[in-house]
Image (cartoon, rainbow, N blue to C red):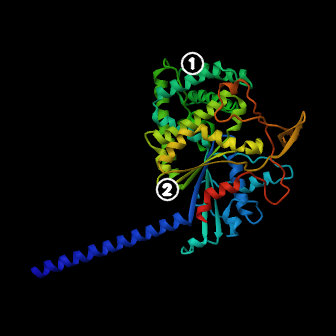
Amino acid sequence: MKSSKLDAILAKGKQLGAAAKEQGQQTLAKGQAKLQQSLNGHLAIAVTGLSGAGKTTFITALVHQLLNFDKAILPLFEAALDGRILAVKRSPQADPCIASFNYSSAIESLMAASPKWPQATAGTSQLRLQIDYQPNSRLRIFSSQSLMLDICDYPGEWLLDLAMLDQDFDTWCDYIDSNLKQLEQARFNRKPDAIGHLINSFYDARAALVEGTDEAVLRVAKIYQQLLMALKSQGLCYLQPGRALVPHQLLDSPVISFFPVSPDADQSIKLMLSDRFEQYKQTVILPFYRDYFERFDRQLILVDCLTPLAAGKMQFNQQLQALTGIFQHFQYGKQSWLSRWFSSQYEQLNLVATKADHIDAEQRDKLVLLLEKMLYSQIEQSKLTGAKVELQAIASVRASTDGTANYQGKSYPSLTAKTLNAEQKHFNPGQLPDGLPDDDYWQSPSFKMYPLAPAKSEQTCLGHIGLDALLQSLIGDKL
């Protein structure tokens, strides 16, 4: 009896020992894999930006410079400067369920005899590069000499929906209606009558809605979507729902076919739209951020500060409101999404001001300062979480060349470029404000923005501003 008990105890001990050994081996293997991945191995970068920030052009240019590392001018990208990059090639993407980024078509547009900006991407897309390199001498103890770089893009408009997570339908309706009334009273720089007409058309259509059928509601939702698109074309960007602007596979689906209603709206219609509002939050917003962001190590946000600055006070303030709202919810919202960005997995945020070639070289530091001032409190709070936050100004593909012009015996910075209608233009862009524009600046704004065409490349690689420094910040520590 005693012998059988002892045998049972010994057998149990062996089982526990084997289980502990197996668990220890699994933990060690996971730790080694995580260490290898964190040091070299693999890096996933998410790229986003509000409409017009140049996301498609940026990804195309970044990939182009890496694929042509041996010919590219990248003096601040240390691995290329030191000759440690051996080869860069396209590799099958990680997730076959996500659309592939159409690099070939985009680079063809930029490298054409008459270059054009590539067509903007819609929805999410992905591209993978394999970078073979000679490790830095202090890292030679690690065997891996390849970095699998995943570049994933998604529409910045989808970020605008984050604030909706903390709202119920009534609160959201009050907020949107308040904004529309302010817009009605404001004077737009371009086509004010068209905007006012669309706002009134939306009000009339929703007032006439008396039956809650899918078809009737969709008709009003389409008018609201047209209004959002028109406001977007005027430079306004804090528009919801974001999927109405970039619907992707959800075009005309009931889950995005909702709109704000007045307090005295028919209760059955209001209930139907409220249900769709909640379904949108639960089935569109939350799953995207829960599932999509788990894949990334670093986040890059492209910001076009210059276009809204040139468009006027309302457009600039809308951009500021959109960016602030996004970051406030990431940081302070119920879901605390920012803390997920900056967990051990999401350790770095790059904020990048685009279109630096639309201002002269002497003002490019002021562009970085403008971006910093726009998000100063959010950046400082992010740093408190231990996040690495990098700010830079770039031109993914140069559209201008720097020069000087003489006026009344004095020399002034100038730019030379082709406009979108192929007109050769020499101009001084004016002055950026020293920080955030105040009321005095808006009384007589001096900065002008011209829509420019990409410059024709006379060399193998496209010209750029700052991509080498950005590459060093993004992936330099992994090579």
**279 left or right, relative to 134:** left
Which residue occupies 70% across, 30% down? 234
- Residue 451 x %, y %: 79, 38
Residue type (three-letter) at the residue carrying disc 1: Ala
Frontmost residue, 92 versus 254: 92
Tag count in the figure?
2
Q: Is residue 335 visible?
A: yes
* Label 1 SS: helix
In three-dimensional space, the C-alpha distance between marks 2 and 1, rounded to whole angstroms, equals 49 Å
Q: Name the image quarter holding residue 357.
A: top right
Frontmost residue, 443 versus 255: 443
Residue type (three-letter) at the residue carrying disc 2: Gln
Quadrant occupied by the C terminus:
bottom right
Which of disc 1 and disc 2 is earlier in sequence? 1
- On residue 71, which mark appears? none
- Residue 184 x %, y %: 64, 20
Q: Is residue 272 visible?
A: no
**389 left or right, relative to 60:** left
For label 1, the crowd category at 10 Å Cα-Cα, with few meaning under 14, some 14 to 19 and many 20 or more, is some
Quadrant occupied by the N terminus:
bottom left
- Residue 339 x %, y %: 46, 47
Q: Which residue is mark 1?
A: 207
Q: Which residue is mark 2?
A: 345
Q: Is residue 13 above or below residue 128?
A: below
For label 2, the crowd category at 10 Å Cα-Cα, with few meaning under 14, some 14 to 19 and many 20 or more, is some
Q: Is residue 295 above or below residue 332?
A: below
Which residue occupies 18% across, 76% down? 9
Q: Residue furthest front?
A: 409
Q: Name the image quarter holding residue 82.
A: bottom right
**90 left or right, relative to 161:** right
Frontmost residue, 381 versus 418: 381
